[in-house]
Image: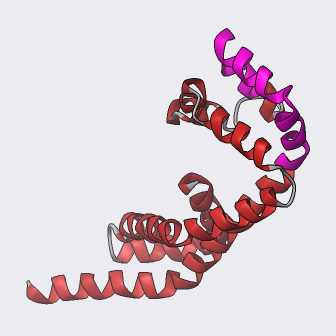
Amino acid sequence: MTTTITALLEREMAGFATEMMEIDGRYPGFGRRLRRQVGREIERAISRRIPVLRHEFEEFLKSRLTSDDIETALAFQRERVVAELRDAAFVKSLEVGGHAGRSLSARMSAGMNPEQRAIVARFLQSPCGRKLIPLTRQMEALKYGWMQAIANGVSQRLPVIGKEILQKHYTRSAKF
């Protein structure tokens, strides 16, 4: 999530590349400090806003799934192989670059071992799984909107963050 939000911000900041290079030239390390502070801002925003996303997902799913479906989905989420599929290395392997246009499901399937594929297939063929499949795009849209809101909030704070970094630089320089 942090990587996606950072990528959204970097796209916005691309228009300021020349200015950023000039500032970094006058204040060496500014860009590095800015990226580090932006990362902290993103992490804080995610921590603050995760309950909002959780609530949005709950409301979205409650209106579309039965309580039995939700229990089935939660049981699936507790499966050991699902934890393995959430592993950072596996998630990173799904990134779009270098996959020649393969769909997310094709990339996921290619990265799974036979046991993982069997457990996921069993869930997707269950009544709950069949209900969730068409909802996936809408859930991804909810998540993307949530991430975009975080990126927009951090983006609005960029001038303040930059000013704070420069003030710290001036303070340190004045002491010498």
Query: Magenta stretch mostly in which secondary structure?
Result: helix
On the question of residue 111 being in view, the answer is: yes
- Between residues 110 and 19, which one lies in front from this camera angle? 110
Q: Is residue 113 above or below residue 125?
A: above
- Up/down of 107 relative to 97, above or below: above
Based on the displayed image, in which of its 4 quarters is residue 74 positioned?
Answer: top right
Of residues 174 and 37, the one nearer the viewer is 37
- Residue 143: quadrant of the picture: bottom right
Q: Is residue 18 above or below residue 91?
A: below
- The magenta span reads 107-136
Name the residue nearer the viewer: 70 or 60.
Answer: 70
Q: Quadrant of the N terminus?
A: bottom right
Instruction: Judge from the rendering whether residue 1 lies leftward or rightward of residue 109; answer left or right.
Output: left
Q: Quadrant of residue 120?
A: top right
For residue 96, say whether it is visible.
no
At x 43%, y 82%, the residue is 161
